[in-house]
Amino acid sequence: MPKQSLPEPTQKRSQAISDIDEYGYCIVANALDGRIIDSLKLRIQEQAKAERDFGYHRKGQVQDADGINQWISTLINKGEVFESLITNALVGAIVSHLLGEEFILSDFSAHVVRPGAKPLPLHIDQWWMPAPRLPLDNYARVSDINRDNTTTGAPQLADTPINPPCVVNAFWAISDFTLQNGATRLVPGSHLSGKQPPPNTVHEEFSIPLIVPAGTCTIWDGRTWHGAGANTSNEERYGVTTYYGGPQFRPLTNFTLGTHAAIVEKASLQLRRLLGFKVWNEYGRTGISDEEGFALPANEQLSTLKSN
């Protein structure tokens, strides 16, 4: 595993790609300017308060059993200010490097880490991928895979075949990330181990905190071990995840069903592709597609027919 140096914030595409290949993550400096940071933070604060007031926040999640933190999901519906985060050119280039030219948005949510939050267990984003097996070895049936029956072990360089990256997470710091307010922790090089962390275990001794200023975007390979740190400060920590996956994988958020019709109607071709409306090698089809290869909704499809 790499030990001598770690990725530094950069705006160079070549350096970012080199870092994510070697360490499993890269840090894009100054990805957002001060004006957009302020707008994003205000919109997150407003939405978080409203969702808690109406009881819409998600409690007792796998990664936050205490319910102190808050996730605000499906940001595509919660303010135009968020949209530029999922179409950022440099981020898209890095995601394309790992996943190829065709990829879709799997999740788009804000994460509020509040004072008193405990460190969250380290995990990987593509925990659901079946582990490689020899032809006659026993294996977990794909629909039986869960976070408790994955292949765990040490985060050291594997000497047997491992899965390639299938998802990529671009995590935007909307406030400064500090050691005190729960900066995300990563295990450099863990993406090449072929292993996952044991469930519900915090490994602060060999993870590193991402101490970065607001406006930074940290991108990690879906196999990289990571988790939010403890918030021992008196301030909230704000982040937004733009999480991408291969077009053949079911996304974490069902954007084709959950995106407001008015947003889909005015969306650019790029945004509609990211939301999963474009057919990929016949997957995602609804019967007939338009000239651009996008699936058509039910009300534009053929229904039961009878010929004379």
Image: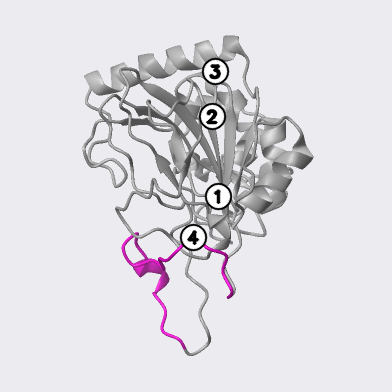
What amino acid is found at the position of numbered circle 4 in the picture?
Pro
Label whose residue precedes the other's in the sequence (4 or 3): 3
Label whose residue precedes the other's in the sequence (3 or 1): 3
Q: Residues within 10 Å of mark 1 (few under 14, many from 20)?
A: many
Task: Between label 4 and label 3, give the one nearer the viewer.
Answer: 4
What amino acid is found at the position of numbered circle 3 in the picture?
Val
Task: Between label 2 and label 3, give the one nearer the viewer.
Answer: 2
Task: Between label 1 and label 2, give the one nearer the viewer.
Answer: 1
Task: Between label 3 and label 1, give the one nearer the viewer.
Answer: 1
Extreme residue in the front direction? 4
The magenta stretch is 137-160
The numbered mark at residue 188 is 1
Quadrant into which the C terminus falls: bottom right
Q: Position of residue 114 (x, y in %)?
A: 31, 25
Q: Do the residues labelled 4 and 2 touch (CB within 8 Å)?
A: no
Residue at point 49%, 49% (across, down): 251
The residue identified by callout 2 is 172
The numbered mark at residue 81 is 3
Label whose residue precedes the other's in the sequence (2 or 3): 3
What amino acid is found at the position of numbered circle 2 in the picture?
Trp
Q: Residues within 10 Å of mark 3 (few under 14, many from 20)?
A: some
Alpha carbon distance from label 3 to label 1: 32 Å
Q: Where is residue 87 in the image (x, y as percent from the top left)?
A: 65, 31
- What secondary structure is the stretch in magenta mostly built from? loop
Q: Are marks 3 and 1 in contact (CB under 8 Å)?
A: no
Quadrant into which the N terminus falls: bottom right
Q: Position of residue 277 (x, y in %)?
A: 59, 43
Task: Between label 4 and label 2, give the one nearer the viewer.
Answer: 4
Horizontal relation, residue 94 to residue 219: left or right: right
Alpha carbon distance from label 2 to label 3: 14 Å
